[in-house]
Amino acid sequence: MNIHEYQAKEILREYGIPVPEGRVASTPEEARKIASEIGGKVVVKAQIHAGGRGKGGGIKLVSSPDEAEAAAREIIGMQLVTPQTGPEGKKVKNVLVEKAGKIKKELYLGIVVDRSRDTEAPVVMASQEGGMSIEEVAAATPEKIIKVVAHPAGSFSGYQGRKIAYGLGLDKPLIGQCSKIVASLYRLMIEKDASLVEINPLVITEDDQLVALDAKINFDDDGLFRHPEIKELYDVDEEDPLEVEAKKLGVNYIKLDGNVGCMVNGAGLAMTTMDLIKLAGGEPANFLDVGGGATPEQVENAFKILTSDKNVKVILVNIFGGILRCDRLANGIVQAVSNLDLTIPMVIRLHGTNEEEGKKILNESSVKFEVADGLYEAAEKAVNIAKQQS
């Protein structure tokens, strides 16, 4: 689960990590009031779950409450497009109004769970190249990233924090501040079941203080049952409406940008199916996994989600019959086609438990579809149909 910057900063405050003075506003008048109380220059920042907000005009530095109100009036309600939102952008509901100060240097600090085979542990990363995407730094100048691997069952030791601080080339007065921030950030990550915590940039101010100027925290969904206070921060408006609907209907769905709808069972088969669609020259429209124990009702729900996406030109049903028997899936398809009055073309590949029974049910029904026996054959047929329909 993702949260907004202003929410992440509230959590940083809980752990004693310095952040700029500021509050969130949902109206231009509120932004003016906050700027007046803070005094001096302030930054007005759009609050959406995406980076690159400044490039899209979602961050403005202003010098007075009047300008803060004008900036908020411009930002709130805008459809903000950034490199991370896609061309459709995201609507801004709130802005964060924060005190602006002079900055001597920008740094990067983050912790992520490294799932690579040789570590599988939290890794603290830091760089003097703050303000940039860490992926860009890793690609262009990997030697500028400092990494310290923490033991997943242990605490973060003082010497590890100092290793980060010295690696950043900080002056002596900042070594202790940096070590303390790193230790607090690590404790936050473990105690809150976060999968990523990131401060970018972590700035050195004119008076030699380290301050978290921007923050991002992602949480492990499987750990949310332990954190009702975090679940309350969930903003349904930041999620794709179809993904929200899919959760309600009990299917796993992630919307993508293509036009080939995929209905599969199992994440591995979903990934394979999407790869083969790409190999055949097409683009998957989604990742939809009905799971191993799907009922005919869940299969029908999956079709509802797929056909709600107007970009879907063809549906590829690729099922490996294991716990989900092919005959049960076939009954679900027949039920969905009948109840939903589906006309969209389908390519169906069934393999595994009760495969023949499933094919018999489909062949004896009124469902119109193309059959494929091989994985690539199925993907190729679906891509060709999608091209004809576009």
Image (tube, rainbow, N blue to C red):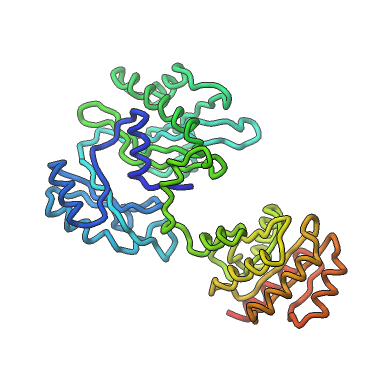
Q: Is residue 187 above or below residue 5?
A: above
Instruction: Please tell me which residue is depicted at 12% across the width and 49% down the height of the picture.
Output: 64
Image-based side of 15 in relation to 343, left or right:
left
Q: How many marks?
A: 0
- Rendered image quadrant of residue 98: top left
Is residue 299 toward the left or the right of residue 60 in the image? right
x and y percentages locating residue 297 in the rendered image: 67, 66
Please identify the quadrant where the C terminus is shown: bottom right
Name the residue located 65 percent from the left edge and 34 percent from the top edge. 117
Identity of the residue drawn at 25% across and 37% down: 20
Work out whether 169 lies above or below 67: above
- Position of 92 compared to 322: left or right? left
Residue 353 pos. (x, y %): 85, 60
**Is residue 327 placed above or below 197 in the rendered structure?**
below
Q: Nearer the viewer, residue 179 or 98?
A: 98
Picture quadrant of residue 305: bottom right
Q: Position of residue 79 (x, y in %)?
A: 34, 64
Q: Residue 54 versus residue 64: which sits nearer the camera?
A: 64
Give the residue at x 58% y 71%: 259
Q: Quadrant of residue 100?
A: top left
Q: Nearer the viewer, residue 62 or 22?
A: 22
Q: Is residue 95 above or below residue 38?
A: below
Q: Position of residue 354 (x, y in %)?
A: 86, 63
